Image (cartoon, helix red, strand yellow):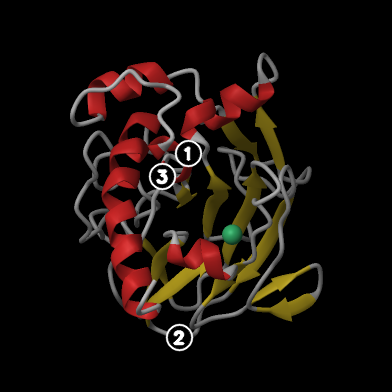
Amino acid sequence: MWMYHSHTNEVFDTNAGLIGPMLITARGMARPDGSPKDVDRELVTLFSITNENESPYLQENLKRFAKPASSQQNDQRLAGINEPHGVNGYIFGNEPMITMRKGQHVRWYVMSMGSETDLHTPHWHGNDVVVGGMRMDTVGVLPGTMAVADMVPDNVGIWLYHCHVNDHILAGMITRYRVVSDTTALDGSATTMPVPVGGVPAGEGGVAGSRSSFPVVPAVAVVAMALVSRSMIARRRRALLPGR
Ligand SMILES: [Cu+2]
């Protein structure tokens, strides 16, 4: 796995979402479409705190999504709230469900991008993975680094998959995956999640029928979701820390 991203303006462009993976299969191991013969499902997850204040689309986003409409780029209120802590740009589990079948060979590609706060520890509930010969349920990634984790799920259910850094959990760096029994048909519409405003249609978020997935919500949609999530975070903190 290799990460590629824009170098035209590395910081601004990556905060606009210009990041992607290159997945390279060993010679002799690839199907005609390039995917590895010995893997049933490939999933790419980007853990990143997207600083929308450094996106070249900031002004456009403010005009389209801020209520009331604002063009105040230096509005201090934006400093803390315009940085969605996302997995593939989704927060608080609003990603269309990632679905796999028990016993499949699932390969997770994990990557991180961002600043000094982007030290992430993706953590799987319910099933474990093997990374570099070591069995574990958490892997660490720093900005600009990647990891490949192989899973053969044996635990049916809907499980959390999230960054294990406490602040990042509270800010929404949480998603889910579903393991269905080895006899369940995967019909390509295995999502029950609402589609975020401006987001990808249901069925493109790593659901059955699509062997590889890299769902990305446009930056503009992430801004809208971040504004909503901010009040959720505030409520949660008030509940956890009475008197503050
Ligand atoms: Cu994190």
Question: Foreground mark, 2 or 3?
Answer: 3
Q: Is residue 212 left or right of residue 21?
A: left
For residue 233, what is the image quadrant?
bottom left
Instruction: Give the residue displayed 27% in from the left and 54% down from the top.
Output: 188
The label number, if any, that marks residue 155 in the structure image? 2
**Residue 166: % across, % down:** 55, 70
Marks 1/3: CA–CA distance: 6 Å
Q: Residue at horizontal 74%, vertical 48%?
A: 145
Which residue is outermost to the top? 8
Q: Is residue 236 left or right of residue 33?
A: left
- In the rendered structure, are the residues bearing label 1 and label 3 in contact, judged by CB atoms less than 8 Å apart? yes
Q: How much space separates mark 1 and mark 2, taking CA atoms?
A: 41 Å
Residue 79's disc number: 1
Q: Amino acid at mark 2?
A: Asn
How many labels sit on residues?
A: 3
Residue 200 lies, in percent from the top left, at: 29, 38
Q: Secondary structure at mark 1?
A: helix
- Considering depth in this image, is 42 or 128 the residue closer to the camera? 128
Element at badge 2? loop
Q: Secondary structure at mark 3?
A: helix
Specify the quarter for ligand 1: bottom right
Labels 1 & 2 near each other (Cβ < 8 A)? no
Sooner in the amino-acid sequence: mark 1 or mark 2? 1
Disc with the residue nearer the chain's start (2 vs 3): 3
Cβ of disc 1 within 8 Å of ligand 1? no
215 or 64, nearer to the observer: 64
Estimate the spatial distance between the alpha carbons at disc 2 and disc 3, rounded to whole Å: 36 Å
Q: Is residue 157 above or below residue 3?
A: below
Residue position marked by numbered label 3 in the rendering: 81
Q: Residues within 10 Å of mark 3 (few under 14, many from 20)?
A: many
Position of the C terminus, as image quadrant, is bottom left
* Mark 3 residue type: Ile
